Amino acid sequence: MTPRAELAENIDVEHYEQLQQEARARLENPDALTDIEHTEKILRRAQARLKTVKLAQDPKGFAALNELAKYS
């Protein structure tokens, strides 16, 4: 990951919310060409980015993010 991607203020929330919705829709109604593993990976990444933003907005969550950053 790039340093830019790790910062909550650089995460495009609308983009990741859209990705999350699209991935869930694909998993609920997969067609013959749907790569389930890849779609699940996209969903997990979107959820992780949105969680990062949510934690950064919460003062207690922000402290937890700083602690995690020390170990990465």
Image (cartoon, rainbow, N blue to C red):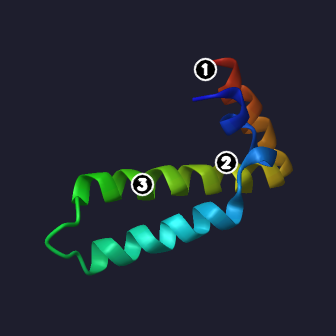
> Answer yes or no: do the residues labelled 3 and 1 have beta carbons within 8 Å?
no
Q: Secondary structure at mark 2?
A: helix
How far, Cα to Cα, is label 2 from label 3?
A: 15 Å
Q: Which residue was labeled with disc 1?
A: 72
Q: Secondary structure at mark 1?
A: loop
Side of 55 where 17 appears, left or right: left
> Answer yes or no: do the residues labelled 2 and 3 have beta carbons within 8 Å?
no
Q: Tell me residue 72's x, y (percent).
A: 60, 20
Q: Tell me residue 26's x, y (percent).
A: 32, 73
Q: Which residue was labeled with disc 2?
A: 52
Which residue lies most toward the top here? 71
Side of 1 where 57 appears, left or right: right
The residue under the point 49% across, 74% down is 21
Establish if 51 lies above or below 22: above
Instruction: Give the crowd class for mark 3: few <14, some 14-19, many >=20 residues within 10 Å.
Output: some
Disc sitting over residue 42 in the figure = 3
In front: mark 3 or mark 1?
Answer: 3
Q: Tell me residue 32's x, y (percent).
A: 13, 72
